[in-house]
């Protein structure tokens, strides 16, 4: 055992009992013989404190200070009896004896000044001063280790063995301790959980979030005695070695760092001043600091420069014009500038400077894409999605609300109106249709119709979600923490919570709703607010395409030959096979049917509406099945000859799976695919193959006069009964037509006897073309226009245009807020349990904030007006902070959803308040606020940081250089589409289904659900594949994987700030996703066409500039040229791979371009798009 270890052991013994004689002698010997042991002893004893207690002083001596112990080595007072008054004289006496001993051993002092003798210690390495951190949260993450060996040298104010000596303060005295900035975060993190606002969970009757609680008499002692560290019980607990008394207690796994202890120590010594939480105080517009700097362009820069100057730092130079225009365009529209826009700005900026910058800001703020860009974070906050969530996660239509948000930003709707209409648009007098649409903000939450759930519990969950979202989005408060108990950290009680809850507990919504893709109530039919300026051009283009379709004969003869052969061969070897119906069931109509002896299904009272029926069928031994036939049978209980006495039914979808075990429901993992669907007849415009359209755009109905109607489906591959003797078949009958009374399912072998076409058309096809009359010719040509594969692209464009016109002109369903004629009562719920009602409450707001103004019972409209009142301390701050985070990467308050005690202290509090007040004074003008931010010199700084800046401000919280951060998921994809030329810039409308890997939705789908419930993913066609990413259909249980890879949320709940990760999956997306691969090959095609005979090095420069916005260095061109040579060698030897690469995606293949050459440049494009600067906003 070393000398140091032994003295530690002895000193530890001293805290428990007096020394024995042998231990005293051993300690004396160690102190005389071992300098290391003496140093260790001096580290644990404070001679000055002892002498001060006796009224003495310390004498300075040359060389090392030493102190030894004579025969009477200090003995600690017994545990449990430790009052300072009782033992002060002993400590003083022992200190004097020790000093005398030192003189006897080491001689007299070399110098004396009067009667005072000062002891000094030679310190080989002085401790570095640590300034009070601007962010105490950073202090909390310090890795400083506390010294486990401290000798207690004075007594405690309670029943303690004594107060251990605290280490010397490492906190600089240059900046006074500030409670909100320095102390509150420490107390909130480590103390408030047990000693905070929650009176029910409060321990030891001690409250530390208020001064009254901290200084209260706790029975002869106080937790905090301002200015008196020794009498402050909290301090003893903080530095105690006793695990039973240490605070925070060890079982909490919270540990105060040494820096945090020093902050608390200084705070108590300086008077333990409390401040009201900064966020609850009304912001004031401080005077803008004048730094006398030419760098400053507006008020923002004054605050930033002053803080940098205070920290001994300076701002960075302005970024190059190329960087500025790319940064601004990405920030304001989410899209990169075109090469022409870059060059135009560079020239204009050189000539007109600041005015050119202001003009481009105006241009981008006026762009319709501005609203799309700003909508993305708002959709995160409002938890917008296209499905209901929970287990079934069926479809919903809320895109009208998304359109409203986009248009609100584009029209520069003042933020107070923006908030008011979303929270209470339905209550505004003479509310417009658009104001009802706006209230969808609080209908975006998840909804369920799942059996077994409790409606009242669901309604409670919906309201809980509205409280959480509203409080986080507009107040920046975590009110959800008060659902089950008083808030642990902020002064928000359960009563506050449920009074706020009452505002959103008055709807006419139902606890079980939203089935089959139908919006849950309350809902309305309404029109989109997106401007209709494109209608005329849409109609013109539609007319042109229809004329082209009607006149086109491309591919007609090959199509005719194919369908003629099909008609000639049908019925060959056809044989019906009886199947045994072992079970039938319906999730929509349980018990309303019977399975008859012949295997048919009979409904006594069919009724109307969407219904699904499952059939478990057993195959007979023998031949394989080519498919199934669904027969509609006459009702045996009536004399009517038609199977449809109450109307002709429709079939929307048929699903079939095969298995070796009986399964009552279709197994989506064993689902069969179909070759074709045919029928005995066709009524209406939809042919039998409509049931194969997974998008549910078509269906099939037999003709009304068909006496033996049936639908026949042929499988892609025959089913072998020896391997899979069971079929599960689900048939969907769509509304509004009547359900059939009676039907049966058989199997068949051979070629189907039915046709895909009506009897008249089938007859015409069977004839020679020369024998057609005018009616027959038109029938055949009409079928070709409808089904000819060569015209698929034109048909898709026509369908998309027709849908777009309907989007702009027709009413659509959307969910809205309302007030029920019989509003529900609101009670405080014990532990948040829906059925544990305690006290009845009415509407109200948290008492820590200014009171709400209302004539009688406050309504949601009163709440909205209260939130946007100029006197409200939070709303403007929270809104400004979020907008700041959009353009600077991090908010002035980094915790954008939490302005409470657990939130971070603002990096620039005066700036935040100045902007908040200015925002309100300027009419809550969002575009004006954004203009001020992007006009600042702070925003325009170069993002490159020196080593010194990275060391002093590693997270750039002081903004000594321009922020640099990765683009959001949506804008990474949008950039690829835009630069390649594929982007379709239409604004608004229903969500779209771009490419995604097959089968993902099946992993979370429910059996037998119709496409309307969004259980089956089917990619769109045509321009819908190339819309901006905020229009991508968002299924909560299975979001688009490319978006998820880049941290887009699933929007099950409110998200005010996305996480940012770096994973290999992201590279796999941008390298291999079909959307990106297609964009790269189209980019390559355009590049080759645009650059003509340009040599490869010049072409590389053009490609680089188009993607990144800057001119490459020679070394970069050299590296790219080497890569280009390697790719040419690879694809020249493998042309098949080249052709496969340039065929990815649905867009037309290049004409007149060598596939090998295009593949090579496709890989160059892929490399350029995957550069860090391409994926980063810098």
Image (tube, helix red, strand yellow):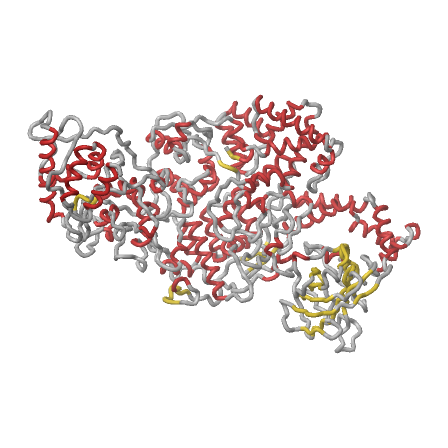
Give the number of callouts.
0
| Quadrant position of residue 257 | top left
Quadrant of the image occupied by residue 364? top right
Q: Is residue 235 above or below residue 1169?
A: below
Left or right of 473 on screen, residue 217: left
* In front of the other: 552 or 449: 449
Q: Residue furthest right?
A: 771
Q: In percent of the image, x 35 and y 58: which residue is there? A: 486
- Determine whether 66 is above or below 782 in the image: above
Pinpoint residue 930: horizontal percent, then vertical percent: 47, 38
Image location (x, y in percent) of residue 1019: 66, 49
Q: In the drawing, does residue 42 fall left or right of residue 251?
A: left
Asked whether residue 672 appears in the rendered view, the answer is yes
Q: Please tell me which residue is depicted at 41% across the width and 27% down the height of the picture.
A: 947
Please state if 126 lies on the left or on the right of 966 as rendered: left
Indicate the quadrant where residue 1065 lies.
Answer: top right
Q: Quadrant of the N terminus?
A: top left
Q: Is residue 431 visible?
A: no
Location of residue 1066 in the rendering, given as x and y in whole percent from the top left corner: 56, 40
Point out residue 116 in the picture as x, y percentages from the top left corner. 9, 31
Judge by depth and name the residue closer to the eye, 243 or 461: 243
- Towards the viewer: 359 or 610: 610
């Amino acid at each position: 055992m070393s000398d140091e270890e032994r003295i530690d052991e002895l000193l530890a013994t001293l805290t428990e009992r007096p020394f024995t004689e042998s231990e005293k002698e051993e300690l004396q010997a160690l102190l005389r013989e071992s300098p290391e042991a003496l140093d260790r002893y001096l580290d644990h004893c404070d001679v000055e404190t002892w002498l001060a207690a006796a009224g003495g002083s310390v004498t300075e001596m040359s060389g090392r200070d030493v102190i030894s112990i004579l025969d009477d080595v200090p003995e600690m007072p017994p545990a449990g009896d430790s009052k300072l008054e009782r033992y002060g004289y002993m400590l003083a006496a022992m200190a004097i004896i020790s000093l005398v001993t030192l003189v006897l051993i080491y001689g007299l002092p070399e110098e004396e000044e009067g009667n005072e003798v000062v002891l000094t210690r030679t310190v080989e390495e002085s401790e570095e001063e640590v300034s009070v951190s601007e962010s105490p949260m950073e202090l909390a993450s310090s890795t400083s280790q506390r010294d486990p060996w401290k000798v207690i040298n004075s007594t405690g104010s309670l029943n303690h063995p004594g107060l251990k000596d605290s280490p010397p303060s490492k906190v600089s005295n240059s900046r006074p301790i500030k409670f909100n900035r320095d102390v509150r975060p420490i107390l909130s993190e480590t103390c408030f959980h047990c000693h905070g606002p929650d009176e029910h969970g409060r321990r030891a009757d001690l409250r530390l979030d208020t001064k009254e609680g901290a200084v209260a008499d706790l029975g002869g002692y106080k937790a905090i005695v301002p200015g008196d560290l020794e009498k402050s019980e909290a301090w003893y607990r903080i530095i105690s070695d006793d695990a039973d008394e240490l605070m925070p207690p060890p079982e909490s796994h919270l540990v105060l760092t040494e820096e945090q202890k020093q902050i608390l120590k200084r705070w108590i010594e300086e008077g333990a001043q409390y401040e009201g939480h900064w966020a609850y105080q009304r912001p004031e517009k401080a005077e803008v600091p004048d730094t006398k700097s030419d760098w400053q362009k507006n008020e923002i820069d004054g605050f930033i420069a002053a803080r940098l100057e205070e920290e001994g730092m300076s701002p960075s130079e302005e970024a190059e014009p190329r960087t500025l225009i790319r940064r601004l365009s990405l920030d304001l529209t989410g899209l990169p500038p075109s090469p022409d826009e870059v060059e135009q700005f560079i020239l204009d900026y050189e000539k007109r400077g600041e005015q050119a910058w202001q003009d481009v800001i105006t241009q981008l703020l006026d762009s319709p894409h501005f609203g799309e860009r700003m909508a993305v974070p708002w959709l995160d906050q409002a938890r917008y999605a296209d499905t209901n969530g929970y287990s079934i996660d069926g479809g919903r239509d809320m895109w009208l609300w998304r359109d409203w948000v986009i248009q609100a930003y584009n029209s520069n709707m003042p933020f107070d109106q923006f908030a008011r209409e979303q929270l209470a648009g339905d209550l505004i007098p003479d509310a417009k249709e658009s104001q009802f649409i706006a209230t969808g903000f609080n209908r975006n939450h998840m909804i369920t119709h799942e059996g077994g759930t409790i409606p009242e519990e669901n309604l409670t969950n919906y309201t809980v979600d509205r409280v959480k979202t509203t409080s986080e989005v507009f107040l920046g408060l975590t009110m959800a923490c008060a659902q089950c108990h008083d808030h642990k950290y902020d002064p928000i009680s359960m009563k506050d919570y449920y009074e706020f809850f009452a505002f959103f507990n008055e709807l006419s919504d139902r606890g079980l709703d939203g089935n089959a893709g139908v919006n849950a109530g309350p809902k309305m039919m309404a029109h989109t607010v997106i401007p209709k300026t494109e209608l005329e051009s849409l109609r013109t283009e539609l007319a042109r395409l229809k004329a082209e379709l009607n006149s086109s004969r491309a591919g007609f003869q090959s199509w005719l030959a194919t369908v003629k052969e099909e008609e000639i061969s049908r019925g060959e070897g056809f044989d019906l096979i009886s199947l045994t119906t072992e079970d039938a069931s319906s999730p929509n109509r349980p018990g309303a049917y019977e399975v008859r002896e012949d295997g048919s299904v009979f409904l006594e009272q069919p009724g109307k509406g969407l219904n699904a029926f499952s059939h478990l069928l057993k195959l007979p031994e023998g031949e394989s099945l080519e498919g199934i036939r669904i027969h509609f049978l006459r009702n045996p209980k009536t004399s009517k000859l038609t199977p449809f006495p109450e109307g002709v039914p429709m079939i929307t979808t048929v699903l079939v799976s095969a298995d070796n075990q009986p399964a009552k429901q279709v197994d989506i993992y064993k689902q069969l695919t179909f070759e074709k669907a045919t029928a005995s007849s066709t009524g209406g415009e939809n042919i039998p193959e409509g049931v194969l359209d997974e998008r549910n755009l078509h269906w099939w109905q037999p003709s009304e006069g068909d006496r033996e109607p049936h639908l026949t489906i042929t499988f892609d591959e025959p089913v072998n009964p020896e391997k899979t003797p069971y079929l599960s078949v689900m048939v969907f009958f769509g509304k509004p037509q009547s359900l059939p009374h009676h039907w049966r399912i058989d199997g068949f072998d051979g070629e189907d006897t039915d046709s895909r076409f009506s009897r008249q058309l089938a007859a015409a096809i069977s004839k020679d073309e020369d024998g057609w009359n005018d009616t027959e010719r038109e029938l055949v040509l009409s079928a070709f226009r409808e089904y000819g594969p060569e015209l698929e692209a034109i048909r898709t464009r026509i369908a998309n245009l027709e849908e777009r016109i309907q989007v702009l002109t027709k009413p659509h369903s959307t969910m809205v807020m309302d007030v029920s004629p019989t509003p529900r009562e609101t009670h405080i719920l014990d532990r948040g349990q829906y059925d544990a009602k305690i006290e009845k409450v009415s509407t109200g707001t948290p008492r820590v904030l200014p009171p709400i103004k209302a004539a009688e019972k406050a309504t949601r409209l009163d709440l909205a007006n209260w939130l946007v009142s100029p006197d409200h301390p939070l709303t403007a701050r929270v809104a400004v902070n979020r907008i700041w985070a959009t353009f600077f990467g991090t908010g002035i308050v980094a915790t954008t959803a939490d302005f409470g005690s657990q939130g971070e202290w603002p990096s620039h509090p005066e700036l935040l308040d100045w902007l908040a007040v200015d925002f309100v004074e300027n009419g809550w003008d969002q575009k004006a606020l954004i203009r001020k931010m992007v006009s600042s010199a702070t925003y325009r700084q170069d993002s490159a940081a020196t080593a010194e800046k990275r060391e002093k401000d590693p997270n750039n919280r002081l903004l000594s250089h321009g922020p640099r951060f990765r683009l959001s998921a949506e804008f990474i994809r949008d950039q690829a589409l835009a630069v390649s030329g594929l982007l379709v810039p239409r604004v608004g409308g229903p969500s779209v289904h771009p490419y995604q890997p097959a089968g993902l939705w099946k992993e979370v789908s429910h059996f037998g659900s119709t496409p309307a419930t969004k259980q089956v993913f089917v990619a769109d066609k045509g321009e819908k594949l190339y819309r901006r990413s905020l229009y991508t259909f968002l299924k909560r249980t299975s979001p688009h994987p490319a978006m998820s890879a880049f941290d887009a949320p699933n929007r099950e709940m409110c998200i005010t700030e996305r996480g940012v990760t770096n994973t290999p999956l992201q590279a796999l997306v941008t390298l291999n996703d079909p959307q990106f691969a297609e964009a790269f090959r189209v980019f390559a095609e355009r590049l080759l066409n645009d650059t003509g005979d340009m040599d490869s090095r010049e072409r590389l420069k053009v490609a680089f500039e188009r993607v990144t916005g800057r001119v490459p260095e020679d070394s970069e061109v050299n590296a790219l040229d080497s890569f280009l040579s390697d790719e040419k060698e690879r694809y020249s030897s493998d042309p098949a791979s080249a052709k496969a690469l340039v065929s990815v995606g649905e867009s037309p293949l290049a004409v007149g371009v060598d596939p090998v050459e295009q593949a090579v440049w496709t890989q160059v494009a892929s490399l350029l798009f995957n550069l860090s600067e391409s994926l980063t906003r810098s």
